[in-house]
Amino acid sequence: MTQYITPEAYEKLKKELEELKTVKRREITQRIKEAKDLGDLSENASYEEAKEAQSKLETRILELESYLKTVSLIKQPKTNHHFVEIGSKIEVLSLTPPRQKKTFIITGSLEANPLEGKISNESPLGQAFLKRKKGEIVVVKTPKGEVKYKILKVS
């Protein structure tokens, strides 16, 4: 499944990658050098810790490089806001008690944060809203039962 990410999150990850490749690599290289200068490497805890940190760093660099090559950027929906798409901000009314209005932003799984109203396009809730339009009733199956929402606004 395609992973989606906002341009802001993409830039944040690119900055993290750049810092890891420059600043953090230099720091760990220095730590390894200092540990080697202490002598016997077979019983050198500082050296082992620095090598482990280097391994974790290189793994994170590879993960970020791979991820950034394969993600799709979320663009602001170009439609006239009739249908819910990735990147859409929607206002809904819960028709299941307690009846309340909620606002959601449909985003990729990496940026999902339900407490902030950001729901993943891969989540049951996100999938239920995708390709729906203003005025539609959406039924979402949850562990606690079905929840019904009416889409009030799509932007």
Image: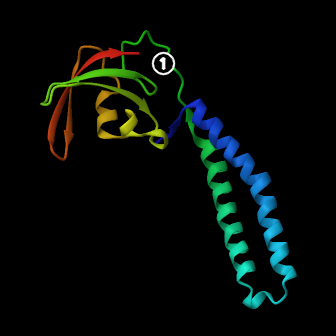
Q: Would residue 39 appear left or right of 57 to someone viewing this image?
A: right
Image: 45 above or below 151 = below
Amino acid marked by disc 1: Pro
Q: Spot the residue most to the top.
A: 80
Residue 25 visible in the displayed image: yes
Pick the quarter of the image with the N terminus: top left
Q: Which residue is mark 1?
A: 77
| Frontmost residue, 37 versus 71 | 37
Pick the quarter of the image with the C terminus: top left
Q: Residue at x 53, y 36 (%)?
A: 5
Q: Quadrant of residue 122?
A: top left
Residue 120 visible in the displayed image: no
Q: Quadrant of residue 62?
A: bottom right
Q: Residue at x 73, y 79 (%)?
A: 46
Image: 36 above or below 83 = below
How many marks do you count on the picture? 1
Return the x and y of residue 140 as percentages of the image width and height.
21, 35
Specify how the rendered protein is coloured.
Answer: rainbow
Q: Residue at x 64, y 65 (%)?
A: 56
Q: Would residue 128 appear left or right of 6 to someone viewing this image?
A: left
Image: 101 above or below 141 = above
Return the x and y of residue 64 as percentages of the image width and height.
63, 50
Q: Would residue 78 appear left or right of 152 to someone viewing this image?
A: right
Return the x and y of residue 51 as percentages of the image width and height.
72, 73
Q: Residue at x 36, y 39 (%)?
A: 115
Q: Quadrant of residue 101?
A: top left
Name the secondary structure under disc 1: loop
Image: 16 above or below 137 = below
